[in-house]
Amino acid sequence: MVTGEEGGCLLRVDRVAKSYGGLKVLNDVTLTVPQGSITGVIGPNGSGKSTLFDVITRYTACDSGQLTFNGQSITGLAPHQVSRRGLVRTFQLTRVFPALTVAENLLVFAGRPSGRGASRGGRHGEAAAGNPAPADPADAGLPQGEDQVRELLEFTGLARLATAEAATLSYGQLKLLEIAQVLMLRPKMLMLDEPMAGINPGLADEIAAHLLALRDRGLTLLLVEHNIPIIQRLCDTVVVLAAGQVMARGKPGDVLADQDVREAFLGD
């Protein structure tokens, strides 16, 4: 069985368990995410991947175990408190302001850095799915965010669509916009839940290139993904969940060549 732990971790999940009624969804899950790396979480449907993400970001309380981010416990924090410390996420379904332009969708997050200062709550907190609440869309002309918006639009390839309403974007472009939104919060770590789901291969390759560039800039990423070629291309470390337990972790090539993993996840 492929195993191993790395030092210098930014996130540590230690013996986390979560049950719903009599169903044990997570069972003694332990893993680390090294700083400046991309870690992928894979596993069959129902293995606990989404629940693990919800537990880490505190949308769901764990029954037992500890969560440590950047050297500090986050086990008892609320979701917005976790994101204010620099741990932010996206979800499987994109959450943007469809009536605003692409640029405005970023500007509403201006002045709300998660990892470099406090932010206040607001009625639009759900737009970032629990990340620090963006500013009111009526304040979408905040000058302090304009340079950052331009940089992120160029980085994500959305600059030509800056004045287009978000409702007109393709699903893949909405995924890029959501990534740009959370990057406005200047996170220390970004968690992505199935970023390639429902996206055509060409745009998936483009998003993968952006994620590698983010890692090279020093951002730490944790992602759930079913696209094995993307996992092999992106990830420094892969963690395999099966029936709520970590059954393997290590380099992508080693993990995906493991016979137990192939039987559990790939059906070989």
Image: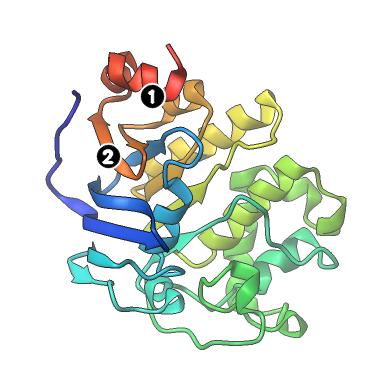
- Which of label 1 and label 2 is nearer to you? 1
The numbered mark, 1 or 2, whose residue comes first in the sequence reads: 2
Residue at 67% across, 42% down: 157
Q: Amino acid at mark 1?
A: Ala
Helix, strand or loop for disc 1: helix
Question: Is the residue 9 above or below the residue 74 in the image?
Answer: above
Q: Quadrant of the N terminus?
A: top left
In this view, the residue in front, 206 or 253, is 253
Residue 2 seen: yes
Residue 139's spot in the image, x, y percent?
72, 84
Q: Residues within 10 Å of mark 1 (few under 14, many from 20)?
A: some
Residue at 60% from the left image edge and 61% from the top image edge: 181
Q: Which residue is mark 2?
A: 246
Residue 218 as seen in the image, left or right of residue 137: left
Give the camera-side residue of 143 and 211.
211
Q: Amino acid at mark 2?
A: Val
Place of residue 170 in the rendered image (x, y in percent of width and height, measured from the top left): 80, 43
State the separation of the CA atoms marked 1 and 2.
Answer: 12 Å
Place residue 253 in its image quadrant: top left
Q: Which of these two is toward me, 115 or 197?
A: 197
List x then y, in percent, for residue 176: 64, 47
Q: Is residue 222 above or below residue 42?
A: below
Q: Is residue 90 left or right of residue 36?
A: right
Picture coordinates of residue 4, whole percent (x, y): 14, 34
Q: Is residue 229 left or right of residue 16?
A: right
Quadrant in which the C terminus appears: top left
* Pointer 1 residue: 264
